Amino acid sequence: MAIPMPATRPVVATPKAQRGPAFLSRLDELGRELWQDKLGTLGFAVIVALLLMAIFAPLIAPYDPAAQSVISRLKPPAWLPKGSWEHILGTDHLGRDVLSRVIYGARASLLVGVVVVLAAGTFGVVLGLWAGFKGGRTDSVIMRIVDVQVAFPGLLLILLVISVIGPSMTTMIIVLAITNWMVYARVVRGIVLSVRQMPYVEAAEMIGCRTSRVIFRHILPNLISPLLTLGILEFTNIVLAEAALSFLGLGVQPPATSWGLDVANGRDYIFVAWWLITFPGMSIAITVLAVNLFASWVRVTTDPQEREKRFAYQRAKAAARRGRKAGAGPASQNQGGRS
Amino acid sequence: MLNAVPAASPAPPLLSVQGLDVTYETGAQGFWGRPRAFKALEDISFDLRPGETLGLVGESGSGKTTTGRAVLRRIKASAGKIVFQGKDITNVSGEQLRKLRRNMQLVFQDPYASLNPRMRVIDIVAEPLLVHGLIRHVDEARDRITELLRVVGLPADAHDRFPHAFSGGQRQRIGIARALALQPEFIVADEPVSALDVSVRAQVVNLMQDLQKELGLSYLFIAHDLSVVRHISHRVAILYAGRMVEVAERDELYDHPIHPYTEALLSAVPVPDPRTQRQRKRIVYGGEIPDLVNPPPGCRFSTRCPLATAQCKQEAPKLTERSPGHLVACWNR
């Protein structure tokens, strides 16, 4: 057995121009893979639709969400007796159009939810990684800070900060991020502690990887699925927390609106006018469901083993379907796979 | 089967370990508590010549893995000296230690856990080249990796597949390819075949031997399987409870063991002939392995040794040369 060892000279790098189309074709491939997962596609479509709705709210909404009209207050949705097509989802106690408010409400709710989850998540993940990776005293100190802040009532802190600085969208986002990062730190630290013991992490250190590469290349990918799940659960929490703050007058300031604020406001009318609370509530639910469906696809896609399993399963299903259509012959004879 | 040739080169040793101690700190009591010391290795000394395989044998907890990790500077030595290629590397750290990794590599015991499940084979094998700046992008190394994979006996289409698509033996080959990527001179093989099927074991061991012949590698081969060690090693060292009890050329050690512990260990190796096997007598000693947090002052085997005397309990025996190249630590033999 002759073993010609490869030369140690670095080969000339491929020109950067070639990477552009490669990136596009990868995106195309991912798109096709997503299309195979109907629920994931649905989730993705709903997310895109919600984002478009939030961005183009002034073009879509039939009314100004803040325009009041006492004559037409508490009108039910169009399909109920006394309802009219002028206000498809009815009106609230001040005669404001519920549909318009739902469309505009998406802006504040999505913005606050997404930004707070990202900000708190980033901060929590960084601290959790640091604590878990360093261990020892660093770990103890960081986790005690987490404990202290978990024990401290979040709402009290929020009230203090907002009453000093004054309510605004930015303040609310910062304050919610400050009071919600701890759960990420705890989860991440736990996972890092266990992954750090894996032989492949030791292997990475043994071949001479720098610490940053070990963390980002070998440890961080293991956090994707728990963080996705956690982030989505937190998103709901944040939307509701935003509602609570807005209800107290410390969050979104009228005439602006948000789903949470409408849910909170409609609470008093729940027995007379169920639509006030139902439609914004449903919007929150649909958003969370869509994010969940899409995230479930992302989770599988980022795990090579799960991804191959899904691929094989879909192939087998497609083959069986074609076998039934052909009417004769066992499904296993079908060799044509999907691209 | 015994085709390993004893390397009798008088060249200076590639690796020289002198009086190595490793102390683990265990269970600090509370936030301000003082950690207790656990002496995992005490006074380990050996040389490794270029192109030589030193087999390291011992029972669980005897310090085999710790020795391998300490030599690679993965675990801090609390005393002693490690000299590699004529340079004292005992206290090297940071970037220098990272550079050192180019010349010393590790093959892991568990082929299932030692490969990152989220990386393709090519990414795993090319990573050492990447982190040492020999290539800038994995694709540059494609040909080189193909060659490496061929050398370790993997199919050429293994590149873009993930580790879970391979069997244990194949995964171990990927691990070996990763260790070879930087063309190191010294490889610590930490029980590389103990997690594999017996049928695959021979293949991997033979592969390692072939690579040694072609590339002039030196191995520190850690194992608890005495037959495998006999097959691959030129010299064998026996560890017991963190101390070295006997070192000798392979055949010398297997044919003429001196230390009572080595004798007992060798008597436990089954012989592939039922009649001979039935007539053999296994030596079994009672007693307990000493607690390494509070080790006895004398010989660590004295708690189980049939020959133990008052001297054994008081004073630890040093490794002394009995015949050329055959060192034993025992007062009574």
Image (tube, rainbow, N blue to C red):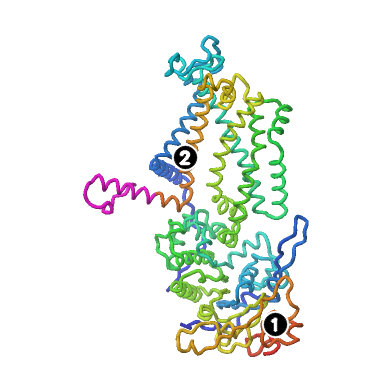
- Residue A313 is covered by the magenta coloring: yes
Q: Which residue is mark 2?
A: A294
Please report the residue visible at 56 percent of the width from the left and 36 percent of the height from the top. A235
> Which of the 4 quarters of the picture holds residue B234?
bottom right
Is residue B257 shown above or below A239? below
Is residue A196 shown above or below B258? above
Question: Which residue is outermost to the top?
Answer: A71
User: Toward the viewer: B122 or A284?
Assistant: A284
Q: What residue type is disc 2 on?
A: Phe
Q: Residues within 10 Å of mark 1 (few under 14, many from 20)?
A: many
Q: Residues within 10 Å of mark 2 (few under 14, many from 20)?
A: many
User: Toward the viewer: B326 or A166?
Assistant: A166
Please report the residue visible at 58 percent of the width from the left and 74 percent of the height from the top. B220
**Span colored in magenta:** A311-339
User: Toward the viewer: B161 or A162?
Assistant: A162
Is residue B300 shown above or below B167? below
Q: Is residue A221 left or right of residue B158?
A: right
Q: How much space separates mark 2 and mark 1, taking CA atoms?
A: 65 Å
Judged by its main secondary structure, the magenta piece is helix
Q: Position of residue B161 (x, y in %)?
A: 43, 57
Please report the residue visible at 47 percent of the width from the left and 39 percent of the height from the top. A294
Q: Position of residue A85 (x, y in %)?
A: 43, 15
- Residue A32 is covered by the magenta coloring: no
> Which of the 4 quarters of the picture holds residue B102?
bottom right
Q: What residue type is disc 1 on?
A: Ser
**Secondary structure category for the residue under label 2:** helix
Which chain letter matches label 1? B
> Can you tell which of label 2 and label 1 is closer to the viewer?
1
Q: Which residue is mark 1?
A: B302
